[in-house]
Image (tube, helix red, strand yellow):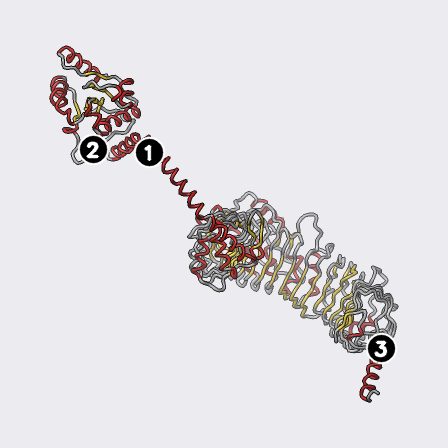
Amino acid sequence: MASLPEVMLVAFLLLSGDAGEGGEPGGVDTCEPCTCSETHADCSSRNLTTVPKTLPIGIQTLDLAHNSFHELIRKSFDAYANLTTLNISYNKLKFLDRDVFEHLINLLILDLSHNKLLLSEHSYPEGLFRNQKMLQQLFLQSNTECNENYRYPDTVFSDLTNLTELHIDGLKNFVFGKGFKHLTKLTSLFLVGTCDIETVRNYSFTYLSNVQNLSLVHCGIIHIEQSSFSPLSNDIHYLDVSDNVDLGLIRLGRAFYGLRNKTVRILRANRLHRHRGTGIALKCKDFASLKYITLEELHIDDNRIEVVDMGITGLLPRLKRFSGRNNLFLFGPYVLTGQGLKEIEWADISGQSASTAEFFNQNENNLYLKYSRKELTCFPSDETQHNLSISHENIIHLDRKLSGSRSDMNYAGCTFRLPQKLIFANFSRSKLSFRIQKVSFCNSTFKELDLSHNLFSKWEGPIEGFESLEKIDLSHNFCDYINNSVFKSLSRLKTAKLGTNFLGYAMKDIQFNISILEHLDLTDNKIQELTRSNFMLLKSLKYLDLSHNDLRSWNADIEHMHNLRTVNISHNLFADFPINLALQIDRLNSRNLSVDFQGNFLQCNCLTLKSLQWINKNSNIFLNMQGLVCMFNHKNINLTNIHDIVLELEKTCASYVGLMIGILSIIVLVLALYIAGVVFRYRWKLRYLYHLMRNRHRGYLPAEDVEHEFEFDAFISYADEDRGFVVREMREILEDQENYSLCIHHRDFLPGEAIAANILKAISSSRKTVVILTRNFLKSYWCRYEMEMAKMESIYTGRNTLLVVVMEDIPVKDLPMDIVEVMRRDSYVEFTDDMEGNAVFWQNLKRGLRG
């Protein structure tokens, strides 16, 4: 028999189960079909038609968006009195029961947007919000169809005394009635969703005196009456009238009258003109009321503004931030009056579809600098609007005149005065096409300057007056030349973005000389090679980006960069990690250094094994190892398993080491034998050329194209054993009797000079070389050498220099083939002892010497 405690436990469990199935609100486990936590229930996109009854009682947030509610009955939310946030947007509600929110006294945020709740008493019955005294944010936009008969049910909204933010549809010629005067805490009003206002009346905001944030974006506004904004708070944080393309800046300017003596922290007036027609001219008379408005931030993007009166900057003395992106600004003289914006700190004038007006030339520049020093202003008053002597028409004439002037900043004395507090300026995507030559700026406090996506193709410099600049962006400028002095005066520059140019062609001459530079971006510059001096002076660099270039090797020096944190050389043409860079990283010995090396065409083979071993050893420094891919065994593989790849390559490559050494040895041996054969075959020619150049260098021989008289008639080549015949007979007969000049080596060679040099000098300075052919001659090395040099002399000079005197009867078989060839090709004489033959010999010899 069961004990009493066991019976009580079973009864308790049964009772708990019955309570959960009875349809009453329960715990987290009974949340179907929603997703719940203790304080939040997400019932969105469940195709619900009624509010679930099984949600936790204590939830504070209930999301019923994107369902199929057509109506909400009285007791729909009675069980969830703790709700602070209720979202019923994107349903099909057409009306609300007067008591549907009766018990939601803690509600702070209510979203009823994107339903079919027309702005009428039928959809919003009086007393609907009588208990929502704590409600702060109400979203009712995208409910109303465009109908002139609708009006705001102000008696319904009058109960929302704590409402601070209201999002509601904009009605044609709308008026917020007397009921809204009770909404004393309403500071933010957003007319959005279905918004077709057309005209903003002078009395539209009469009972909204505390509104500080007003949005009228995309509301089809055509006209704003002069005093429409007068009832608003004197301290307006945010006013946005953007995307009213039929309103126009001029009509808006006239509506500024209602903001006189007020402070407007942020004014957005973007896209108030359609993208067609001519550009817009901003004239002082149209914006006279700005002088009496304390405006801190102005956005007039995408308005086709083309020219501006010179004094208009004087109307904005308190302006701190300005955005004029995507306009058509001409380069006019008004740019020289920028110093009138004395408080401006931030300016974005990017995306200009600029006209063809060129930069000032010298005379015009001086003229408008003179005008700018007068600090021309609009001088508006209540009754009259004083016009400047430089009108809109004059400015148009000026711009046309400037179209033929030079576009180079090449006037050395040109000084541009900048607003004293301007820190950031963006001139990107504005089709600026100047050569950056020497130019100076005054009053510059720039810290960041964006000149990207323009056409600054030559950076010559120096740029002076930007001593405070810390960041400059000159990327996407088609630059192919950069002078080392261009950044010389930028002593505080920390970030330089120079990517997507053509600096690869100029890298061999570039040396970045900014000592405190921390971030250098050279991505996509077609860089093929670096030099050691490129980064030698960058001692503080932390980030170096050379990605998307054409690097195959690494010659730059980064060993001195002890603060370096990231080297990005991804997406280049490296076949392996450059060993030179690896050695420098090892010497840096930095634990915080990271390398991005992905996207290269890596090879995994025996030739790159050393590089792969280094990557394996230092894999912790590589960013995104999954992005490292190499070609291994004809397949692209990921280097996440580089350890296994290295082991396999080490085994494979080791087995081929001996074979590779053997093959290399054979190749070297074959090449050596081939070279030796070539040298042996042309040994005499090489010797001749060597001594010829040597003698010519030392001044022994004249240049080939210079005519000269020979010093000797004949150089006698003989063996020392045949000296007697040469000294006694030849010298006496040819020199003493016939006045021939003979070169005899033991008599005429230069003492102390090499024999080979003396021989070549004697042959070159003699008309003929006479060979005394004997068996002793054939045995002598130097005699053979003299004959070979004489043959080379004949070949290179084109004259017949050899004359052979056969002194002995030597069989042809005992003669070398080269001598036989000489005797067959050239003349020779035979010596004889008989009296008649001897006389004939000397006659033939003398005739041969003259030939």
Residue corresponding to mark 1: 679
**Number of other residues with Cα within 10 Å of mark 1, as a class: few under 14, some 14 to 19, many 20 or more:** some
Q: Element type at marker 1?
A: helix
Residue 487 horizontal side relative to residue 34, left or right: left
Name which residue type carries label 2: Ile
**Number of other residues with Cα within 10 Å of mark 3, as a class: few under 14, some 14 to 19, many 20 or more:** some
Residue ranking furthest to the bottom? 4
The answer to which of 718 and 87 lies nearer the viewer is: 718
Which of disc 1 and disc 3 is earlier in sequence? 3
The answer to whether the residues at label 1 and label 2 have Cβ atoms under 8 Å apart is no
Circle 1 or circle 2, nearest the eye = 1
Q: Position of residue 706 (x, y in %)?
A: 27, 26
Residue 444 visible here: no
The answer to which of 530 and 683 lies nearer the viewer is: 683
The answer to which of 827 and 431 lies nearer the viewer is: 827
**Number of other residues with Cα within 10 Å of mark 2, as a class: few under 14, some 14 to 19, many 20 or more:** some
Q: Position of residue 499 (x, y in %)?
A: 54, 52
Q: Element type at marker 3?
A: loop
Quadrant occupied by the N terminus: bottom right
Count of number-bearing discs? 3
Rounded to the nearest angstrom, the CA distance separating label 2 from label 3 is: 126 Å
Circle 3 or circle 1, nearest the eye = 1
Rounded to the nearest angstrom, the CA distance separating label 3 from label 1 is: 110 Å
Q: Position of residue 381 (x, y in %)?
A: 65, 62
Within the image, what quadrant is residue 844 found in? top left
Rounded to the nearest angstrom, the CA distance separating label 1 from label 2 is: 21 Å
Q: Which mark is residue 755?
A: 2
Q: Position of residue 799 (x, y in %)?
A: 28, 21
Q: Element type at marker 2?
A: helix
Name which residue type carries label 1: Val
Residue corresponding to mark 3: 24
